[in-house]
Amino acid sequence: MNKFSKFFLIFAGMSFVLASCTKDLDTVPIDKDVVTSAQVYENPKAYKQILAKIYAGLAVSGQQGPSGMPDISGIDEGFGQYLRGYWYHQELTTDEAIIGWNDQTIKDFHWQTWGAGDVFISAFYYRIFYQISLCNEFIRETTDAKLDERNVTGSLRTDIEHYRAEARFMRALSYYHALDMFGTVPFVTEKDPVGSFFPPQISRKDLFDYIEKELLEIEPLMIDARQNEYGRADKAAVWMLLAKLYLNSEVYTGAKHYDEVVTYTKKIIDAGYILEPNYEHLFMADNDRSNEVIFSINFDGMRTQTWGGTTFLVHAAIGGKMDPMKYGVNGGWGGTRATKAFVYKFYPDATSSLRISPNPGKKLKKADYPIIYVPGSYQGWDPSNTETVLASKLSDNTYEGYLYFPDANTEFKFTTGPNWDINYGDDGADGTLDANGANIVAADPGYYKINVDLNTLTYTVVKTDWGIIGDATPGGWDSDQMMTYDPSSKLWTITLDLTAGSFKFRANNAWDINLGDTGADGILDYGGDNIPISQSGTYMISLKLGIPDYTYVVERTSYDHRAMFFTDGQSLEINNIEDFTNGWAVTKWKNIKRNGTSGSDLTYVDTDFPMFRLADVYLMYAEAVLRGATNGSLSDALNYVNEVRTRAYGGETSGNITASKLTLDFMLDERARELYWEGHRRTDLIRFGQFTDGSYVWPWKGKVPDGTKTSPHLNLFPIPSSDLGANPNLKQNSDLY
């Protein structure tokens, strides 16, 4: 499929008349020299260019890069961008995300304390209706009568008929967002007059009916599923929006439409989409290659530059000890993290993580600790080799490290610098160092713990073989499970089945040399605390010695790969919202390609936003069946859920569930695990009755650190007070606003 709107199309200017919900704002003309529709449509290419502007309205906020020529004057082009506003409303109000900025009223989203004057709510509300106005105007200009006037015939006319259907889809999408978030809103279509006009307020039920009718009418007019250019809507996008509408119908209208959910999700499933084999690839800079994506918002770091969109999603999630370049960008904004309530969806006790990340030690630089060198026959007698050194962790002239000698009778000495000026050997082979003394000899090949005390001029050399021991291991506390050393990686490793419990590392099947982790900081300590394992499973354990700091990794070989967190230096608890290190960081969105290279620009990202994708379809089908759909089957529902989970577990079935576990409670959590940070969570929580009530709380819900119940009127965002003042036909959707 060809890529569409991954370029900054020049929008041939025309005069737009917005609905009164935005008429009080200054809308910026695109081209001061082109002011009438007749002038615009003299160029046959204008139809597709204007359609591209409609699609681009979800991705950018104006006509000049990230800022400078805004579509709507007076609204910040960063948080006023459509996708960023959508994400704020759907994620920051939930357990999935929190942001550490003091940006105007943003904390009201976490606290669920917003009001009708909130700037972020107003910005997104006006962006929705600006988008609807773009669609209305294009639809007005592409009627049969208009095309006849312009003598448009042949293939161009056929194309324009598709464009018009797509514009109606895009309008339905924005009206769906208005329906979901605001309920009763101003309503205007292409049939309403252009100019000063106060749109009437439409009820939620009537708006539902309108969106449904529009989608059903345009379905046969759309290009077939998977046959349109990438980034343009097709029949599958229509089916998906219908399925979304029907899945939430009970919230919107009180009527159930779960059979319809099954009908339209099955249409998508039968259309040939397939799950992306690697979950991570769905959120990378070349995710346009995926056959899972049904409809996306497209971004290009060189041509669709914005401070919103996926540029926001990548940058805002980076802070603390995170290296921005690992995520394909040149800096982090230190904003978004996850709450512990969401982390618990993967790790119910928050300690059973798939990976205990090693602490990198002291800045990852050997020179941070004083060192001495160990030249010898095993490394070519090179006194300047910084890979064969010992370090003084306490800077007290005592040094320690571990070195591997591959051959018998390895000879070596110690030097205080990267030269032979001051060197020590052992003339008597008695453990006492002598200046310019004889070479020290290790009789057997192996991995040696070496200690040197330059205060007393003594040393010890102990051959070590490492294993793990503990009640989490098959041998309990009675016998070691021996590890294997790999000279190329310089790691001791073992893979084995563990049970809930704990373990330690120890050398030579004895307690003389043992390592634990006091403080659970990933740095090993002699005689330190036991290392906990809270879930049974197969683990790969790695031990990295060398020179201090000594570190380790405990990694589940079969685990949920969707859990993408950065935890080094991050606390699980969020005691201070403003501190980025409070809360686990999320690494789901990246500006990195599958081959490991960065996107085209290090500031503005290439990663597209998959608004609709197949995994969501599978989960929607399963939920509809659980809610009583009569035209689906529980066996199919279970199979679809397990397809999603098999992908999540790297192609293994160890994460699959049985029919007895397929419940609505499970589905809500599974949707969080699969779709987090993709703009679904608020709608899901409302559908399950857990957004404002007290049955489920998360940190800072209700402006309380541990979370509390909030008012049900918050299930809808308020109509901005500025629009209530501008349009006498409007009434607020709740007396509590």
Image: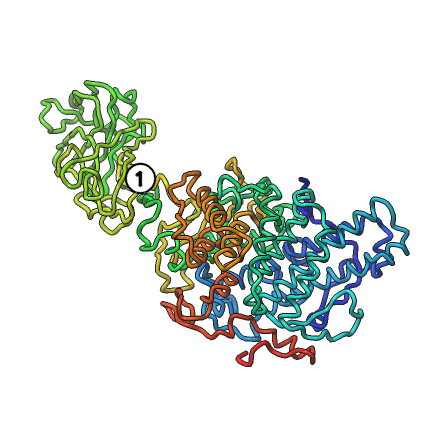
Q: Classify residue 543 as left or right of residue 461.
A: right
Quarter of the picture holding the C terminus: bottom right
Q: Is residue 500 above or below residue 627?
A: above
Q: Residue furthest front?
A: 630
Where residue 315 appears, as percent x and y from the top left, is 51, 52
Against 40, is 490 above or below?
A: above
For the N terminus, the image quarter is top right
What is the x, y in percent for residue 202? 67, 73
From where the camera sits, is residue 69 visible?
no
In this rendering, position of residue 208 left or right of residue 381: right
Horizontal relation, residue 407 to residue 112: left or right? left
- Image coordinates of residue 454 in percent, x first then y, are 16, 35
Q: Is residue 146 visible?
A: yes
* Residue at 37% over, 40% down: 558
* Viewer-closest of 153 and 131: 153
Q: Quadrant of residue 456?
A: top left
- Relative to 169, say whether 184 is above or below: below
Q: Residue at x 65, y 43 (%)?
A: 226
Q: Residues within 10 Å of mark 1 (few under 14, many from 20)?
A: many
Residue 657 in the image: x percent, y percent?
A: 40, 47
Residue at x 13% of width, y 33% of height:
457
Three-letter amino acid code of the residue under disc 1: Tyr
Q: Which residue is mark 1?
A: 539
